Image (cartoon, rainbow, N blue to C red):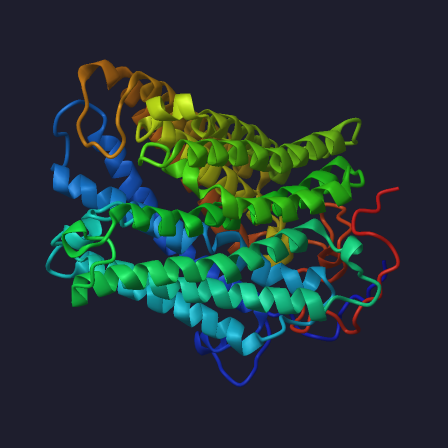
């Protein structure tokens, strides 16, 4: 592979265009600045979501009321879920690292539609503002849970409409970002970059973009149906008006289970970049990883029913969804096998991004294997709507996406900000986060098997010990999170200047200066080799 390092152009951070100050950022069509706009916005609301989660764990520290009433707890877990899912996890890696790195990794100077890219961020912020209205208006924060299940969604007296409308608007941002990425990958790859020479992170963004484009309209229509039911009295889901509340579950999960792969596929792409770089080896089974990415994106459309095994579906439907759930685990297992095979006999560079990648594999395997427990009919009936589901969900969604997000943040930090971070503090933050994460969510598997239901602010005395360990784990995890973010913030301001390729990576982003210039490349690079050529 060959590329011309850009030296004449100023970096995207130094560029002085038509606008100055904050306007130079919020009116910029540079994909790199837009990626950071997403990051900074998400970090603010991630902090809010973490605080809400921490307060919930304080409430569960002991049986009975601890710091809040039941209604407040209902609102807290609803708002926590809405922020974490719709504002953070679904857009997270694609919006931040996809925007910043996709064009550079495929040899392009920007995304296909730069103005649409900026517009997507404005839609994203608009959706957040509408959601905030639901939290701050007079009738109180919504209390239905982040899924907005019927009949709660049309019976509650809290501020459901702004929350549902905000989630609907956020979906448009996701659709437009997916469309932009698909066109960019199809039309703007560098000369010589055939489909089988494209790095794996862009491949996962490509699979994710199709899910965003095809599945997100389903949830959009579903949320509009909820709005129409509340405002116009149309009986889509209310049995009193001739509706069916189970229909809402089907429509919601037809989108929301593919959305799990919107969250996890880009995370898998991040790990597929970190592992070969730090193992100093060509990725094992490149074509199988590509194929499994597309297989996950495809099969993920057909497994939504495993969220509804206790809703009264036919026996045929139950068995079919159970079998499909086990089938979708196969391409995920292929990826894990290939990552471990890549590390086998590799000259591994042990540094912070590798720690995040290795712990991702462990956490993801726990989440995946416990997902099979929920995919089996007999065990699902016992563990449905218990803390076992909460643990599995967080191991996959927060553990999978979160560990990969922080791994990506440390892996590409020198490229994005052009400086190095303090590895000792970074490793300390990772270790505390990992210990806290396992201590926080691990006991929930036990609590769920013992029968503790989820979404309850109170519990029986027999669940006390597990909740104490879980609550204390949340304190350790948040301590690690604070150390990590403070270290990165201080390093971004005062860190030592980073070279173009501090890790010895082989993909195109490591051939341009750190931080990258405005147009990425002086000349569009021409590729002659694959993306992970360490031989």
Q: In this picture, is 82 found above or below 107?
A: above
User: Relative to residue 397, is residue 420 drawn left or right?
Assistant: right
List x then y, in percent, for residue 321. 47, 36
Q: Residue furthest top?
A: 462
Q: Is residue 289 left or right of residue 227?
A: right
Is 33 placed above or below 146 here? below
Residue 482 locus on image (x, y percent) = 41, 41
Image point (14%, 52%), residue name: 240
At which x and y percent is residue 177? Answer: 52, 65
Is 346 above or below relative to 85? Answer: above
Count of number-bearing discs: 0
Answer left or right for 290 relative to 261.
Answer: right
- Camera-side residue of 162 and 104: 162
Q: Residue at x 28, y 65 (%)?
A: 130
Q: Nearer the viewer, residue 351 or 193?
A: 193
Residue at 88% x, 59% y is 528
Q: Quadrant of residue 165?
A: bottom left
In which quadrant is the C terminus drawn?
A: top right
Vertical relation: 316 (above or below) 37:
above
> Which quadrant: the N terminus?
bottom right
Visible residue check, residue 418: no
Measured as percent of width and height from the top left, residue 278 is found at 72, 38
In this rendering, does residue 397 appear at all? Answer: yes
- Relative to the observer, which residue lies in front, 370 or 343? 370
Answer with the quarter of the image where residue 306 lies.
top left
The quarter holding residue 59 reads top left
């Amino acid at each position: 592979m060959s590329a011309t390092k850009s030296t004449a152009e100023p970096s995207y951070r130094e560029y002085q265009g038509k606008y100055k100050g904050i306007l130079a950022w919020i009116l910029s069509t540079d994909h790199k600045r837009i990626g950071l706009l997403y990051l900074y916005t998400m970090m603010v609301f991630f902090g809010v979501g973490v605080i809400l989660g921490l307060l919930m764990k304080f409430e569960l520290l002991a049986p009975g009321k601890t710091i809040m009433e039941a209604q407040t707890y209902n609102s807290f877990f609803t708002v926590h879920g809405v922020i974490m899912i719709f504002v953070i996890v679904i857009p997270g890696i694609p919006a931040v690292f996809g925007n910043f790195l996709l064009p550079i990794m495929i040899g392009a100077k920007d995304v296909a539609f730069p103005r649409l890219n900026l517009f997507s961020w404005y839609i994203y912020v608009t959706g957040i503002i509408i959601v905030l209205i639901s939290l701050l208006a007079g009738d109180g924060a919504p209390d239905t849970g982040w899924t907005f299940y019927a009949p709660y969604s049309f019976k509650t007296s809290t501020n459901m409409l702004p929350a549902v409308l905000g989630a609907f608007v956020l979906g448009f941002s996701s659709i437009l970002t997916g469309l932009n990425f698909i066109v960019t990958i199809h039309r703007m790859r560098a000369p010589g970059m055939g489909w089988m020479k494209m790095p794996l992170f862009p491949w996962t963004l490509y699979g994710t973009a199709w899910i965003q484009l095809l599945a997100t309209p389903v949830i959009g229509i579903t949320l509009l149906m909820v709005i129409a039911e509340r405002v116009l009295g149309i009986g889509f889901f209310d049995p009193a008006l001739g509706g069916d509340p189970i229909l809402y579950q089907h429509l919601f999960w037809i989108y929301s289970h593919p959305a799990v792969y919107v969250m996890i596929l880009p995370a898998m792409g991040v790990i597929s970049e970190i592992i070969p770089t730090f193992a100093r080896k060509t990725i094992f089974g490149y074509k199988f990883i590509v194929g499994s990415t597309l297989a996950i994106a495809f099969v993920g459309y057909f497994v939504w029913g495993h969220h509804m095994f206790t809703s009264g579906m036919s026996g045929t439907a139950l068995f079919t969804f159970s079998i499909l759930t086990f089938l979708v685990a196969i391409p995920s297992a292929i990826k894990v096998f290939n990552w471990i095979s890549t590390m086998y006999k590799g000259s591994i560079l042990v540094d912070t991004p590798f720690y995040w990648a290795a712990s991702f594999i462990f956490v993801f395997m726990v989440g995946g294997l416990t997902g099979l427990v929920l995919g089996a009919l007999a065990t699902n009936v016992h563990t449905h709507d218990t803390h076992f589901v909460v643990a599995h969900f967080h191991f996959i969604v927060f553990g999978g996406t979160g560990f990969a997000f922080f791994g990506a943040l440390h892996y590409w930090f020198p490229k994005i900000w052009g400086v190095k971070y303090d590895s000792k503090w970074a490793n300390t933050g990772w270790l505390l986060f990992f210990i806290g994460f396992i201590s926080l969510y691990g006991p929930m598997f036990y609590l769920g098997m013992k029968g503790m239901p989820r979404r309850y602010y109170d519990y029986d005395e027999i669940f006390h010990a597990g909740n104490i360990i879980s609550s204390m784990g949340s304190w350790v995890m948040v301590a690690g999170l604070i150390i990590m973010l403070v270290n990165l913030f201080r390093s971004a301001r005062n860190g030592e200047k980073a070279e173009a390729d501090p890790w010895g990576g082989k993909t195109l982003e490591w051939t341009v200066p750190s931080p990258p210039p405005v147009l990425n490349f002086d000349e569009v690079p021409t590729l002659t080799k694959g993306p992970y050529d360490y031989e």
